[in-house]
Image: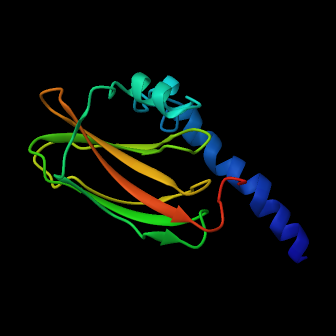
Amino acid sequence: MHELRRRFLKGGASAALLSPLLGTGLLTPSAVLAAEWNKSAFTARNINDALKAYGATGAGETRDIVITAPEIAENGAKVEIEITSNIANTRSLAIFADKNPMPLSSVIEFSGPVLPYVRAQLKLSETQRIRVVAKTSDGKTHVAFREIKVTLGGCGG
């Protein structure tokens, strides 16, 4: 009895309830709007290619990007970092792990007057330098660095 009820609820009832809605146009497939992403930057295999594809080759080093991360990470599979940008009009923060197989880890974009703050978990293949690039609304790029020692690699290393 219970098996018959389960089958009815899984298949027949849901189809019976959804078909009138599909017929009236209330549940129609629509275009999915997704953010643009820089495929060449995210799939680059070395740090120089990733920086070039992201447009950050001429970034000036600054102390106004604060990276809080452990000096030693026992497991590279999960390294938590916090980033705060004190640069006016910061519109995006990009996190690069220089020695990872694909160095660009993430890009976070901000709009309006917000405090550019990010808390992220990275997967690090080995001891390496983390690089955070901030882009401002006037098109300038700034970079800050942080060395993290990894005792057990997280990317198969």
- Residue 101 percent coordinates (x, y): 62, 40
Q: How is the image coloured?
A: rainbow
Q: Name the quadrant of the C terminus.
A: bottom right
Q: Residue at x 46, y 28 (%)?
A: 48
Q: Where 134 falls versus 14 (above or below)? A: above
The quadrant holding residue 67 is bottom left
Q: Where is residue 87 in the image (x, y as percent from the top left)?
A: 12, 46
User: Which residue shows up at 49% across the image and 25% down it?
Assistant: 49
Image: 2 above or below 4: below
Relative to 94, 23 lies left or right: right
The picture places residue 12, in percent across and down from the top left corner, at 77, 53
Residue in front for this viewpoint, 106 or 15: 106
Residue, x 51% and y 26% (percent of image)? 39
In this image, 71 relative to 78: left or right?
left
Q: Which of 69 and 6 is in front in this view?
A: 69
Using the rendered view, name the quadrant where residue 1 is placed: bottom right
| Residue 72 in view | yes
Q: Which residue appears farthest toward the bottom when viewing the image?
A: 2
Q: Which of 19 and 96 is in front in this view?
A: 96
Where 78 falls versus 43 (above or below)? Answer: below
Residue 31 visible to the viewer: no
Q: Report the front residue among 3 and 97.
A: 97
Left or right: 120 as drawn, with respect to 153:
left
